[in-house]
Amino acid sequence: MKKLLFISNAPNHYQNEFYSNLSKFLRVRWFMYDKVIYKNNYTWNNSNKKIKIIYSYNQDISISLNSYNPDYIIIGYIKFLDYLKIIFYSIFKKKKIYFHKEFPEDKKNFLKKILRFIYYKLLFIKTDGIFCIGKKAQNYYFKFTKNSYYVPYSINPYKINLKNKIKKINFIFVGQLIDRKSILEIISAFKLLIKKFPKCKLSIIGTGKYKKTCLKNSKKIKQITFYDFREQKFIKKKLNESHVFLQPSKYDGWSVATMQAMNAGLAIIGTKSTNCISDYIKHLKNGYICDPTSQSIFKGMMFYCFNFNKLKDHMKKNKKIYDRSLMNSTRLSQKVIKIFSKN
């Protein structure tokens, strides 16, 4: 069985699911930089196989490369000196190197754009391919290599509760409580909504810089409930209790939470600035595309409150879209194996 080494900082649940699926086809090892979140020999099982974690503070990457001798290397995050070591290793050992990259946040400063372009030219000079998180990222990285593949973030499918009878709409937001996520605009929009539809509810899961302001702005509004970040089991439970997911970000590289919401069969209100939404959500066909303003978000909320049939239709469509797409971790792992076999 061929070997894969994935290099990144601390893992998250969707990376765990994706690499666990890959471990059905490859031996997988994880070289990790973050020693705070996951330590004490963190491992997880999949089909009776373990993915071993190597910590950067315990072992130099050169030792990991030579002792493990991987056939493929995927880089999510890496320190520059370690990358130089990998380049020399791949040249002498003839190994394959891939990057997994989101679309970079737009730089308004022209000089910064030029410097980033030069940096990427140097960074990808020895790469065998880039796994691009979204179509926008794929179009961008195609400038650096023709081997730019559409490989979005992915999660495993799970069973959902069918919501055939809807008497009131439950809205939900999952993410950081920061300006980029338009959380204050969401609360302002919802306050307008409950004047007309007082039975609607809003669950907000997350924490961040704007938490105190959010609590202040929603004081005495019993229809809004706040939760700190919880385990995935809790988030799945709250998604299953909801109907519409809110993602009106000013910018988002992908949005795993939107992907989870589609998996759970929710309708989506969000912006084109969120790359998961720009790839999979079509305005009024399976979601509502808004601007990151309270008035625009309010219009999206009103649209579903007045159109229960559209709401049900969008919910069913989004579950089907997720199941058939590369956001499904099982389908994505099969695609990556095909990419490896062709190269």
Image (spheres, rainbow, N blue to C red):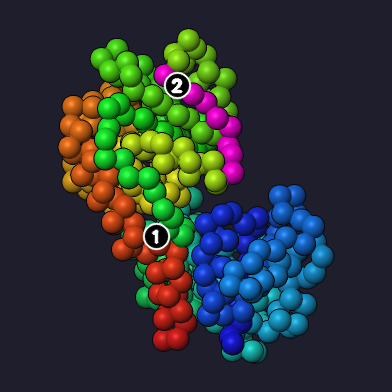
Q: Which residue is mark 1?
A: 327
* 114 relative to 268, above or below: below
Q: Are marks 1 and 2 in contact (CB under 8 Å)?
A: no
Which numbered circle lies on residue 224?
2
Q: Amino acid at mark 1?
A: Met
Residue at horizontal 37 percent and vertical 31 percent from the top: 171
In the displayed structure, does residue 78 sit left or right of residue 169?
A: right
Check disc 1 and report its element: helix, strand or loop. loop
Say which label, 1 or 2, has the lower sequence index: 2
Give the position of the N terminus as an image quadrant. bottom right
Residue at horizontal 40 percent and vertical 69 percent from the top: 331
The reply to whether residue 149 is visible in this rendering is yes
* 153 relative to 220, above or below: below
Which numbered circle lies on residue 193?
none
Neighbor class of circle 2 (other Cα within 10 Å; few <14, some 14-19, many 20+) is: some
Q: CA distance from mark 1 to mark 2?
A: 30 Å
Q: Please provide the residue range marked out in magenta.
A: 223-231
In the displayed structure, does residue 235 sit left or right of residue 268?
A: right
Q: Quadrant of residue 28?
A: bottom right
Residue at horizontal 72 percent and vertical 60 percent from the top: 42
Q: Amino acid at mark 2?
A: Ile
On whether residue 230 falls in the magenta region, the answer is: yes
Give the position of the C terminus as an image quadrant. bottom left
Return the x and y of residue 65 as percentages of the image width and height: 71, 79
Return the x and y of residue 139 as percentages of the image width and height: 33, 63
Residue located farthest toward the right when viewing the structure as drawn = 58
